[in-house]
Image (spheres, rainbow, N blue to C red):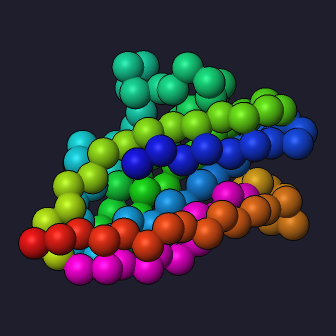
Amino acid sequence: MTVTADNKAGLGWLAIDDPVPAGSTVLGGLAKLATTAEMPQTWSGYRYIERTFTSVRSSFEWAGKGKHSFTYEIRLTTPGKFALPPTHAEAMYSPEVNGQLGNAVFEIEP
């Protein structure tokens, strides 16, 4: 999965919550601090990623102006069609600065 944000201005302490389909497994463990190898090159200040059963939450100390993206892997194990809630991004200390992006329907065939 790849999440891309287009920032109109630099943002401090940005949090992104990206939902995952029901029955899928987010690879890489449930929660841990980001290692240098996991830090995407386009995000400066990538600090934390939390992998849960329902979403992937990432925190960034600083996200400069422009387009940025990060990637994570999931294992899809349950067949069906899955409509996901929108991906939500928010400046942690300025909640009025936020955005949402609708997600496509996932279809997994048996």
- Residue 34 figure quarter: top left
Q: Residue drawn at (35%, 55%), measured in percent from left and top?
A: 51
Please, is residue 98 above or below residue 9 in the view?
A: below
Q: Residue drawn at (75%, 62%), measured in percent from left and top?
A: 99
Q: Horizontal placement of 11 versus 19: left or right?
A: right
At which x and y percent is residue 54? 36, 71
Q: Is residue 85 magenta?
A: yes
At which x and y percent is residue 10? 85, 36
Prevailing secondary structure of the magenta residues: strand
- Residue 80 figure quarter: bottom left
Q: Horizontal placement of 88 versus 48: left or right?
A: right
Please state which of residues 96 and 23 is positioned toward the viewer in this rendering.
23
Q: Is residue 30 visible?
A: no
Please, is residue 18 above or below residue 35 in the view?
A: below
- Residue at far front of view: 109
At which x and y percent is residue 78? 16, 73
Please, is residue 90 above or below residue 13 in the view?
A: below
Please, is residue 14 above or below residue 18 in the view?
A: above
Q: Is residue 18 visible?
A: yes
Q: Is residue 108 magenta?
A: no
Q: Residue drawn at (27%, 52%), measured in percent from left and top?
A: 74
User: What's drawn in magenta, residue-wise?
Assistant: 80-90
At which x and y percent is residue 2? 47, 44
Please state which of residues 47 and 106 is positioned toward the viewer in this rendering.
106
- Residue at far left of view: 110
Q: Residue drawn at (10%, 72%), measured in percent from left and top?
A: 110
| Number of numbered callouts drawn | 0
Please state which of residues 83 and 63 is positioned toward the viewer in this rendering.
83
Q: Horizontal placement of 58 versus 43: left or right?
A: left
Q: Horizontal placement of 97 versus 23: left or right?
A: right
